[in-house]
Image (cartoon, rainbow, N blue to C red):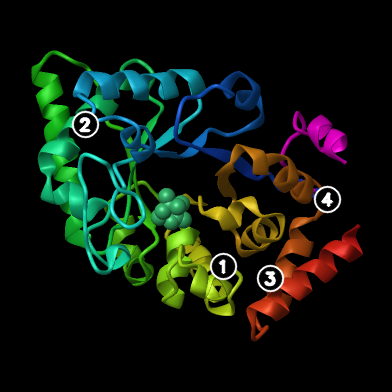
Amino acid sequence: LAEVLEHEQHLPSETPDGHAMALMVNTGLTVDAVAQLKPRIGGVGLYRTEVPFMITERFPSEQEQERLYREQLEGFAPLPVTMRTLDIGGDKDLPYFPIHEANPFLGWRGIRVTLDHPEVLMVQLRAMLRASRGLDNLHVLLPMVTNIDEVDTALRLLDRALVELGEEGEDITRPQVGVMLEVPATLYQLKALASRVDFFSVGSNDLTQYLLAVDRNNPRVAELYDACHPAVLAALARLADEAASLKMPTSVCGELAGDPGGALLLMGMGFDVLSMNAPSLPKVRAAIRRVSLAQAQKLVEETLPLATPTAVRAHLTACFDAWG
Ligand code: PEP
Ligand code: MG
């Protein structure tokens, strides 16, 4: 089976009825597999910039960051590379910037940290912008957004970075900017967000954690953490509809997108960009190549009314068995 899947990696991620899905990768450290991946994907849907920060002994300098980002942007050019600004806090601590809190996932995380430390965000934005010179494939993504002002402030800082670099003689194209939809509050502010940014990226890992009030890393409640919970699926389906009516390009970059059943549900809901860890590409591509868009839409229709995560999982398994 692995050989069949490997063989299919060069074929388009398209359903039998001709619906094209863009498959992107999530990256963090170096881009060793780029040459192999590049012909098979639509770009990088999520580059977690905190990953390289976790293995250094201090905040990397602007120049050091520029080098890291250039490697990603150059490696995948002309494909888009979506660079998320530092998403520390929660489960991700930097040894040289410890955060101790009673409820870290509800605390100082993602954009909340970087807006409190604009000097950190400015260095990062300047490094990203400088790295994108002449390539123009940079997309900037803002994590853990809850309030519209956070987006406005971040956009002001981005504009300031562009002005500064312009004054320093650099000619840099303004990147596309997107917001992570992972705090449930954003689902009720889509219109205001859409008027400010160029794209959305759904973080189904955190969205699941926050919708279900289940810590994604706590083994004691691990059984309750399930992106196939009917409430999560209902939220995603509604989000897909609203994003479509707002004409906002919207991708999904949480683990659900890298699960074949999850990917088919997302496709049936109307998401057409899925970003996942590279090892998930073969099985997701295989699922897409075997199931029509109409079948995926029917799957969503049948699944949304189910009452429990167990029933959802059982239905997905039954469908996969029936499809062979
Ligand atoms: C998510 O929350 O779904 C996501 C993609 O981001 P992270 O897993 O890095 O929090
Ligand atoms: Mg997240």
Residues packed near mark 2 inside 10 Å, few (<14), some (14 to 19) or many (20 plus) = few
Where residue 136 sits: x, y (%)? 37, 24
Disc 4 residue lies near ligand 1 with CB under 8 A: no
For disc 3, the marked residue is: 300
Picture quarter with ligand 2: bottom left
Residue drawn at the location 42% of the way across and 23% of the way down: 73
Residue drawn at the location 74% of the way across and 46% of the way down: 283
Kindly identify which numbered label has been placed on residue 58.
2
The amino acid on which the numbered mark 4 sits, given as a three-letter code, is: Arg
Kindly identify which numbered label has been placed on residue 320.
none
N-term mark: 3 or 4: 4
Closer to us: mark 3 or mark 1? 1
**Tag 3's secondary structure?**
helix
CA gap between label 3 and label 1 equals 14 Å
For disc 4, the marked residue is: 290
The amino acid on which the numbered mark 1 sits, given as a three-letter code, is: Ala
